[in-house]
Amino acid sequence: MTHLGLNSAVAAAERGFQIVCYDPDATLIRQLNADQAPVQEPQLLELMAKNKSRLEFLSDVAALKSCDVIYVAPDVATDDQGNSDLSMLEKLLSVAFENTSHETTIIVLSQVPPGFCRAHGRPGRPLIYQVETLIFGQAIARALNPERYILGLADAAAPLPPAYEKFLQGHGNPPLFPMRYESAELAKIAINCCLVSAVSTANTLAEICEKIGADWHDIIPTLKADRRIGPYSYLAPGLGISGGNLERDLNTIIALADQHGTDAGVVRAWVGNSQYRKGWPLRMLGEYVFSKTKDPAIGILGLTYKENTHSVKNSPSVALIRQLTPYTIKAFDPAIPSQPDWHPNLTNSPTAADAIQDSDVLLILTAWPEFKDLNLTEIAELMRGKTVIDPYGLLNRMQMQQAGLQHITLGTEPNFSQAC
Amino acid sequence: MLKHLHPNSTPPERLVILGASGFVGKSVATMAAQEKINTLLLSSRDVDLTAAKAVDQLVDLLTPQDSVIFCAAIDKGSSSGSEIFMQNIAMARHVSAALQRIAVKHLIYISSDSVYGFETSLISEKTPPCPASLYGAMHRAREIILATETKVPLAVLRLTGIYGAGDTHNAYGPNRFWREVKEHSKIILFGEGEEMRDHLYVADVAWLILQTTQHGSTGLLNLAAGGSLSFRQVAEMIAAQTGAVIQTAPRRQPITHRHFDITARLMPSRPFSRKY
């Protein structure tokens, strides 16, 4: 019952299915039965409450016997290099095999490297890999209305088990793409590689915009209007890839290429570009603040790696905080408090205004919607300095200038350079 | 990136500079004296590092409490041939042999950005070394010799082009431009002087090297300003101050650019990110 499992279960209940939610962690199950979710997602708590009669949270593995389809869906943890720890998935997969009948269809929903399902299947037991495309902050919406189902099968020509097919069709009847295990496992990674490719292209060109007087935000709509690129492409400039899943897939591709002697130079370049882009806030601080202000007080808004999530996995904000050891920081995030082990002089602010108060520089490092509504005149009055580093361009540039604030954002030149 | 043994500035018990009469060594020595750091200054007149007897001489001179800055090199610029290369390697071998017999507290090797090629224009500490000259290959070989043969905590500082009074070299760039102005009231650019380069003031170099000694830093750091200028921009700055004429000559080499990502210098701690 982690991020992936819980959101999938709640969405399926909303679609009218009766769901048994098993987790060996009894504390977590007690928490879920008390209507508390361990993760944050829009609609999650509301739909949990609405579908309470269809959701059964328990730690008793015997309950699995009654199920026709079992999803095994733990979040697969990754280390700093993007290496997966599959041990929990393997453990739960064994639990599923050993506590269900031979007719039960077992689905692996967790992200696995190519070859995993073929290696972990058991003779005579239906095992299917279903590609998940969870996006933090949109998990419920995407689980309710999937774009398509990519299905990895031991034999791509074999029919789907009827109960499983009915379950899939019950999610809005999306298109099904059955294929061999290995193709499905790689399809998931291919999707993420295409996303990273777009992100890396955007970040590379956005930085050039920052140097030559162009504005990347002028260019984005022209790309989205191009049919070969598309309206949903990931073209917003950012601070490198975060969250863990994309990093894991890039790591997997590099490892496969190294093992098989294929060229992964472009994937290594994406990784390098991401690491470089993560340093953008620090470079801006170096250029516009550290060189001009002694012992600047730093205010930070946003800690999570993106909006609408509680996750700080590879968060640019936390990475920056760890690099600012000599300075005093106040930080605010709407979802989570800052942690003392991140920094010796880090104060957890109860409000955005508290984090802004008396700061020499303000950084807005997560694109939470509520930060867009900050009053710029109040920011100018609260701050001691004038520099606002707003990578995602949440604040209005013209109004920033009118308020006398220096606005530094991704994809375009700073509005002026004499502040702070 | 560097890791720091001392979070706060801690002067070394004694600072030994190998190459103390060179451009960098002299500047570090001057700054160390201003900061009242106990120093032992050694130049080729004191110890000829190219000679085998240098090993015994160094063993006699060094103590386990010393921090050693190794900035001695024979530099003949682009004309450096294999003979100079071998002499420079011999110097590193002798220093390494001495340090295997007497493990000093800290070693700072002053390397060069010539260890990098021009395949990529944005250089960071993660850029793989790919020297295009014997001079660059020499510095890379010395880095490896010192890192693999000695057990002394090692910082490698790769310097970009440096400028300032007292430069003994005549490489294309600010120092040569000043010399040309002084002697001929003109500056000669190759092509239009389009090449972008990072230029670091020698006093800033000395300051950064001293910070490295005072924090017991180990690892790798590129020493660069973080903002590149074209040779024409540099020439125009000098011309604006002196009234010199800028002339051009046919280009001898293809246009190359070099910029530095100085994120690693901003990361580690206050002393490496502050200049007042």
Image (cartoon, coloured by chain):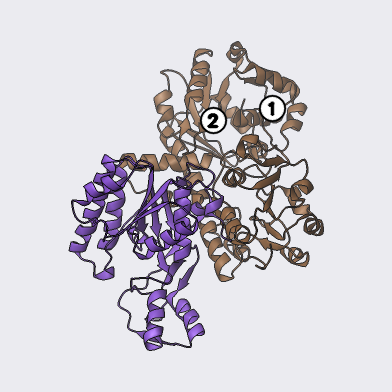
Chain for disc number 2: A
Q: Quadrant of residue A142?
A: top right
Q: Look at the numbered disc 1 and give the secondary structure of its residue.
A: helix
Q: Quadrant of residue B29?
A: bottom left
Q: Classify the position of the N terminus of chain A by image quarter.
A: top right
Chain B visual colour: purple
Q: Look at the numbered disc 2 and give the secondary structure of its residue.
A: loop
- Amino acid beneath label 1: Ala
- Above or below, A185 relative to B250: above
Chain A visual colour: brown
For this view, does A396 lie left or right of residue A223?
Answer: right
Q: What crowding class fits label 2: few (fewer than 14 Cα within 10 Å), some (14-19), or many (20 or more)? A: many
The structure residue drawn at horizontal position 37% and vertical position 73%, both measured from the top left corner, is B255
Q: Classify the position of the C terminus of chain A by image quarter.
A: bottom right
* Residue position for label 1: A13
* Residue position for label 2: A109
The structure residue drawn at horizontal position 41% and vertical position 79%, both measured from the top left corner, is B178
For this view, does A212 lie left or right of residue A50?
Answer: left
Residue B107 in view, yes or no: no
